[in-house]
Image (cartoon, rainbow, N blue to C red):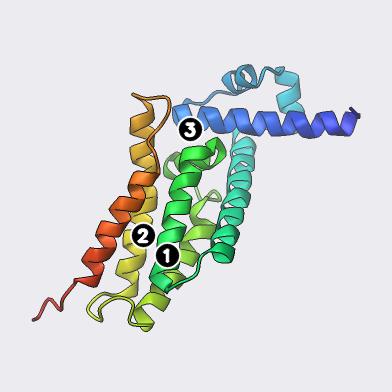
Amino acid sequence: MTKQDRAVRTRAALIRSAATEFDRSGYAGASMSQITKTAGLSTGALTFHFSSKSELADAVVTQARAQVVDVLDEVALNTAGTPMDRLGAVVIALARALHDDVEVRGAARLEQERPGNAPNWSADWYPVIRHLAGLACRSGDVPGSVRSDQVAALAALFVRGADLHGRTHRGHDPGGCPFEEFADLWSIARRGLLAASDPAA
């Protein structure tokens, strides 16, 4: 293995370790020393690649965003049907990513807890949700009494709820909360949207 290969692997290990600690302890609770311990690396290795916890957090968010883009690309390639069908596929795929990928979970918690205007993981998926919600409303996929911003807010609530519910569940069961149950919940919510009537009626 070349020196460059070792450096790439070391950086990846540090990012994954940092994601684990941010997911477990939040931004304020994660320490650089615990991150190096989790990665099985020295403090020198950490400071060679990252000068601060903030820089390391940025790297976790960048990695998570790349994974989210891959998820969205896969959904776009493999999901047919109405805009609401595609929106549901995005919601469930993001719930799966939160369940499966510690980098995504770490970035999701960083978005909630990190101070300042740092990059966040929803920057890639929320615009897609908003776009699909708009298409669903314009195509008549949902009743005219339902606004696109309401559909987008509901979908985002499901994604953020998957993170919160999974985080709570993992505290009791290391296996985590199966994302499949969110598919059932989304189906119920979708039926509710389809049955929505004009409040003035």
Q: From the viewer's perspective, is 2 left or right of 120?
A: right
What separation in Å lies between label 2 and label 1 (alpha carbons)? 8 Å
Q: Is residue 62 left or right of residue 136?
A: right
Residue at 64 percent across and 41 percent down: it is 59
Label 2: few (<14), some or many (≥20) within 10 Å?
Answer: many
* Secondary structure state at the residue bearing disc 1: helix
Q: In front: mark 2 or mark 1?
A: 1
Q: Are marks 2 and 1 in contact (CB under 8 Å)?
A: yes
Q: Nearer the viewer, mark 2 or mark 3?
A: 2
Which of the two labelled residues, at mark 3 and mark 1, occupies the earlier sequence position?
3
Instruction: Locate residue 136, reporting x and y percent.
Output: 38, 76
Quadrant of residue 57 in the image? Answer: top right
Q: Position of residue 99 (x, y in %)?
A: 46, 39
The numbered mark, 2 or 1, whose residue comes first in the sequence reads: 1
Residue visible at 72% across and 17% down in the picture: 42
Other-residue count near label 3 (Cα within 10 Å), few / some / many at <14 / 14–19 / ≥20: many
Marks 2/3: CA–CA distance: 22 Å
Residue tagged 3: 23
* Three-letter code for the amino acid on which mark 1 is drawn: Leu
Q: Amino acid at mark 3?
A: Asp
Q: Position of residue 40 (x, y in %)?
A: 67, 17
Q: Is residue 123 left or right of residue 171?
A: right
Residue 93 vs residue 200, the one in the foreground: 93
Picture residue at 24% right of the left edge, 71% below the top:
194
Is mark 2 in CB contact (under 8 Å) with mark 3?
A: no
Question: Where does the image place residue 148, in percent across and percent down from the top left?
Answer: 34, 73
Q: Which residue is mark 2?
A: 155
Residue that mark 1 sits on? 87
